[in-house]
Image (cartoon, rainbow, N blue to C red):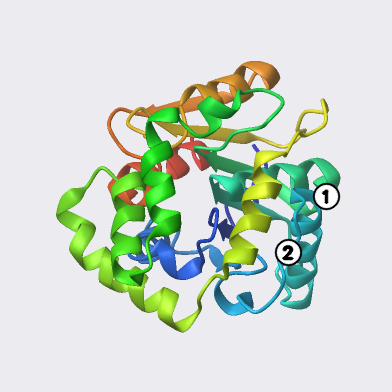
Amino acid sequence: MHKDLGSNWLLLRGLAREAGHWGDFLPLMREVFPDARINTLDLPGTGLYHRENSPALISAIMEWLRQQAREQGLLDQPLTILALSMGGMVAWEWLIKHPAEIQGAVLVNSSFANLSAFHQRMRWQSYQQFLQILLEKDLYQREQAILALVSNSPDRYAALAESWYQIQQQRPVSFKNFIRQITAAAQYKPSRQGPKQPVLLLNSQGDRLVSPSCTQRIAENWQLEVKTHPWAGHDLSIDDGVWLGNQLKNWIVP
């Protein structure tokens, strides 16, 4: 692998989430890679950009994000991207369309519409919970319900729900932007072209939102390496950040 892989990280979150949702994984990441630059960017419509209108296409979200990265000086050397869920779709589009800017990528619990069926990309068992989240008016209860869907660590729900509640109060994601993001994710079908850069795929056996088979389909289609966590939920950074950090380290320094 290239010697600069893992020296300039960019971390991307998923649907309606922002950099603040990385929580205590960020300091852990800095411990694992003490000499690396570790950057985060929020997708349009979330976080620092929650007042922006999110595009309804992954390609447009990627180009918007790429412009932010350029303006912030993040592209002075090629990026290594760690991306969760919908963030993985953005990362994939970026590394295919602009390969000179991306050194490599790690995609966590992501999925593509042309490889996996809708009921796999959003498991049918989660439909009732997802609908309840959409209908929930109480912000704190909504964040608790999201945690119960994406994490398998109930002992962390109370503390994280309070933190996520504060994030949503300060930088709320509008319903319009939520719908535009989920539309972009639902219809994302990448080209047949595979990546020239190294790509690591990670999935969670206990993911109750997205079937781990979605990651397997990506791996099989482009002959990519995949590692599976035995019990974690969709948000692997919450449930076992140490395992995630170790996978990144082992990938960079095999």
| Residue appearing at x 66%, y 32% in the figure | 112
Residue 47 coordinates in the image, percent (x, y) = 55, 74
Decide if residue 218 is on the left or right side of residue 27: right
Residue 20 coordinates in the image, percent (x, y) = 44, 70
Which quadrant of the rendered structure holds the N terminus? top right
Q: CA distance from mark 1 to mark 2?
A: 16 Å
Number of the front mark, 1 or 2: 2
Total labels drawn? 2
- Tell me if I can see residue 129 in this picture: yes
Image height of 118 relative to 209, above or below: above
The residue under label 1 is 100
Query: Is residue 252 or residue 50 the one in the foreground?
Result: 50
What amino acid is found at the position of numbered circle 1 in the picture? Ala
| Residue appearing at x 57%, y 65% in the figure | 175
| Residue appearing at x 38%, y 68% in the figure | 137
Which element carries disc 1, helix, strand or loop?
helix
Alpha-carbon neighbours of circle 1 within 10 Å: few (<14), some, or many (≥20)?
some
Query: Is residue 89 or residue 225 the one in the foreground?
Result: 89
Instruction: Find out whether the residues at labels 1 and 2 contact each other: C-beta distance under 8 Å.
Output: no
What amino acid is found at the position of numbered circle 2 in the picture? Leu
Decide if residue 25 is on the left or right side of residue 102: left
Which mark is on residue 166? none
Query: Is residue 136 or residue 106 the one in the foreground?
Result: 136
Alpha-carbon neighbours of circle 2 within 10 Å: few (<14), some, or many (≥20)?
some
Residue 97 coordinates in the image, percent (x, y) = 85, 45
Instruction: Pick out the residue farthest to the bottom.
Output: 170
Residue 247 coordinates in the image, percent (x, y) = 42, 39
Which mark is on residue 65? 2
Decide if residue 95 is on the left or right side of residue 22: right
- Tell me if I can see residue 240 in this picture: no
